[in-house]
Image (cartoon, rainbow, N blue to C red):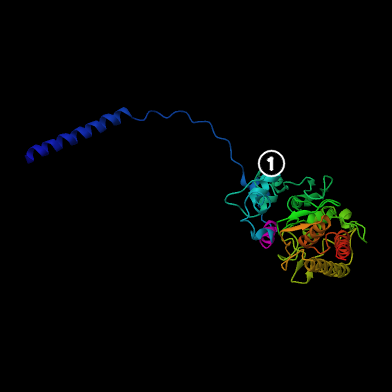
Amino acid sequence: MKRQISLLTFATSAFLVLSFVTISSCTKTGPEGPPGKDGEDGLNADASCVTCHDFSDDLLTKVHQFANSAHGSGANVDRSNEGCAQCHTSQGFRLMVDSGMIAAVSSPAIINCRTCHKIHETYTPADYALRGSGAIAMVMGGPAAEYNYGTSNVCANCHQGRTVTPYPVAGGDPVSITNKRYGPHYGPQSNMFIGKGGYEIDGPMPYSNSPHTLAVANGCVTCHMDGNPAGLQAGGHQMNITYNETSKLLTGCTVSGCHTDAAVVKSMFDENRAEIAALELELETALKDQGLLDAEGYVTVPATLTQDQLGIILNLKLVHYDHSYGAHNYRYTKALLVNSLAALAKSSV
């Protein structure tokens, strides 16, 4: 039996060896063919990447400034649903300014370099160009309201009031309010800068704009980004004006044709802000005393309000969420508060 198995094993092995030899002889490599055509040369990294990624510290400085900013913190990136994603996520913003679409975003990215700049679209210095930089038709302020201040137009895509429903109309019927957060949302800086969007109720002050509205060519950028940044604390891509609690970066203000003395600017800045803050507090207190706002400053709901009451609440919220306390447009801000206070006092008699 063992002899039969051995013979079978030998036969099988011989067959496999013979098969391998036969197959090998059938697939023998022939002579080399002619060389193929050379492929195209790739891009020279020295001629492409380093046009932007050079060996200076300028780009690195901007990256670290931005990382130390409110935009770079990613604090609100989770607000990625439809209606919020266009200003709280990088993908949502690009979708809005590139195509006009507003949609929810999955796996949202925080605001970053490519949010505002066309990074790695052409791999040339043109990638530093701003997206969404044309004139901005404002949501609040009527059909004629437009923000058009050069490089800061990209900011106004989001730093403006949202749709207010219902918007107060002088002489209209009383309206019912059920949303305690009634107002222009949290970033109406562009509205305040151009003096559009408030409820211009009659009062002792005329509605006009401060010189900034006409004199500052690049709007937000002129004061918040131009000039000499204070390290990573203010200016540049960090964008703050105030740092170390009381210090002010005013190099964007003390330029040719504008202010000349930084000390005088800081004094005016602090005095005006203190005045506006006091007027805002006075108006908020008066609205609370009349039961129109609750202890936390929200609208007391449900409520039926006159158009003037609704407009006065809107004015308070517009000033409050601008956060500049008059720095963006002192005259318009003060008129909204003074006239609202006068109208509210008259209605409570």
Rendered image quadrant of residue 4: top left
Describe the element under mark 1 as helix, strand or loop: helix
Rendered image quadrant of residue 74: bottom right
Q: Can residue 198 be seen in the rendering of this structure? A: no
Asked if residue 262 is positioned above or below residue 176 in the image, the reply reads below
Residue 36: x and y in percent read 50, 31
Residue 306: x and y in percent read 81, 56
Q: Nearer the viewer, residue 264 or 211?
A: 211
Q: Nearer the viewer, residue 37 or 301?
A: 301
Rendered image quadrant of residue 193: bottom right
Q: Nearer the viewer, residue 67 or 334?
A: 334
| Residue positioned 82% across, 63% down in the render | 251
Residue 255: x and y in percent read 86, 60
The magenta-colored residue range is 58-69
Q: Is residue 325 magenta?
A: no
| Residue positioned 67% across, 63% down in the render | 68
The residue wearing badge 1 is 99
Q: Is residue 31 left or right of residue 87?
A: left
Which quadrant of the rendered structure holds the C terminus? bottom right
Residue 79: x and y in percent read 63, 55
Asked if residue 34 is positioned above or below residue 227 in the image, the reply reads above
Q: Nearer the viewer, residue 306 or 191?
A: 306
Which quadrant of the rendered structure holds the N terminus? top left
Near mark 1 (Cα within 10 A), the count class, few <14, some 14-19 or many ≥20, is few
Q: Can residue 316 be seen in the rendering of this structure? A: yes
- Please tell me whether the stretch drawn in magenta is mainly helix, strand or loop: helix
Count of labels in the image: 1
Amino acid type at circle 1 is: Ser
